[in-house]
């Protein structure tokens, strides 16, 4: 018995319905915590504690007003911005150059080194907190921007190098050879040819590293002071020993997630761009 086109179309409906169902569940599972945090930022304190929470409520801006008028939230935001942007720039620059070096100077050790770099990412951060604090304290970098910048860069650099090395390894060697024939030095070929081809890898690394530095709490808590507290430490101060100011925490979290979402949207177009496709078109 031959199957008609209508029968084939009907046979595709169950898998499509199952796929749509799982996507819907996953979407709700992902969006529910974000909705709770954002909605609590616009609720009264009594409405936040009400169970079950009301879906329809009158929004207020009192919690945001308290953040900027009574607290040093703007300072926390600027500190996080300075630290995370600096960490992103340092790790991307050094990690890309390190991956390019592994590409140029091929050896058995160099080929395996990129995979060994992941060991640094697997080590729990708390195990290196004490020696990192002692080192920064002796260098008198605690309480400065440079302390958390160096700590975050040290933790993120192996991961960035590993990401970049996997992309640089796939670049055809003929591209470097042709650049050398045209008179380009190794560094000139890197900045004019290789670096633009690494746009997808750089976009991925920027999102991951900036998110890590923006949300990091452990090192920031130990290496900063009142003048250099980032957002994570500032928000943690709203959690008291007896009670939690859920309104201020939710308002601060709502503002803090905006820059990461913005970076994700800005880098999205580079994530879908083919690496060698751009070189062929150029």
Image: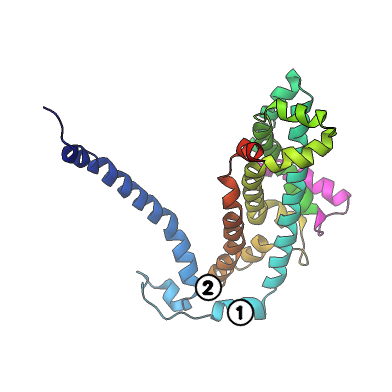
Q: Assess whether residue 134 is covered by the magenta stretch.
A: yes
Kindly report the distance in space between the C-alpha atoms of the residues bearing marks 2 and 1. Answer: 10 Å
Q: Which residues are magenta?
A: 124-146
Label pair 2/1, CB-CB below 8 angstroms:
yes
State the mark number for residue 247.
Answer: 2
* Count of marks, rendered view: 2
Residue found at x 19% / y 38%:
5
In which quadrant will I find the N terminus? top left
- Rendering coords of residue 76 (x, y %): 70, 67
Judge whether 27 appears above or below 171 on screen. below
Question: Reading the chain from its start, which is encountered first: label 2 or label 1?
Answer: 1
In the image, residue 108 above or below residue 135 = above
Q: Residue sitting at 58 percent across and 54 percent down?
A: 264
Give residue 173's position: percent from left, percent from top.
71, 26
Q: Is any part of residue 198 visible from this angle?
A: yes
Q: Report which residue position mark 1 lands on.
A: 66
Is the C terminus in the top left, top right, bottom left or bottom right quadrant?
top right
> Local crowd at mark 1 within 10 Å, few (<14), some, or many (≥20)?
some
Q: Nearer the viewer, residue 177 or 235?
A: 177
> Element under label 1?
helix
Question: Whole-percent x and y of residue 71?
Answer: 67, 75
Residue 102 appearing in the image: no
Q: Residue furthest left?
A: 1
Residue 163, image x, y percentages: 65, 37
Q: Is residue 23 left or right of residue 112?
A: left
């Amino acid at each position: 018995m031959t199957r008609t086109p209508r029968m084939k179309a009907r046979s595709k409906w169950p898998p499509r319905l199952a796929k749509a169902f799982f996507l819907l569940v996953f979407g709700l599972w992902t969006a529910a915590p974000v909705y709770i945090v954002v909605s609590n930022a616009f609720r009264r304190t009594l409405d936040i504690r009400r169970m079950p929470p009301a879906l329809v409520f009158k929004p207020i801006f009192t919690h945001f007003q308290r953040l900027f008028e009574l607290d040093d939230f703007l300072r926390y935001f600027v500190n996080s911005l300075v630290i995370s942007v600096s960490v992103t720039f340092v790790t991307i620059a050094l990690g890309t150059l390190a991956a390019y070096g592994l590409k140029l100077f091929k050896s058995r050790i160099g080929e395996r080194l990129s995979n060994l770099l992941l060991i640094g990412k697997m080590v729990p951060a708390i195990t290196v907190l004490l020696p990192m604090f002692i080192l920064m304290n002796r260098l008198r970098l605690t309480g400065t921007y440079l302390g958390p910048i160096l700590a975050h860069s040290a933790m993120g650099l192996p991961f960035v190098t590993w990401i970049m090395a996997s992309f640089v390894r796939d670049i055809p060697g003929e591209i470097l050879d042709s650049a050398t024939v045209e008179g380009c030095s190794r560094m000139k070929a890197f900045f004019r040819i290789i670096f633009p081809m690494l746009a997808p890898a750089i976009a991925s690394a920027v999102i991951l590293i900036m998110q890590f530095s923006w949300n990091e709490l452990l090192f920031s808590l130990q290496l900063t002071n009142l003048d250099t507290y980032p957002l994570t430490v500032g928000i943690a101060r709203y959690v008291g020993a007896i009670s939690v100011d859920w309104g201020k925490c939710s308002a601060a979290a709502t503002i803090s997630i905006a820059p990461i979402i913005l970076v994700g949207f800005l880098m999205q177009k580079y994530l879908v761009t083919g690496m060698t496709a751009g070189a062929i078109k150029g």
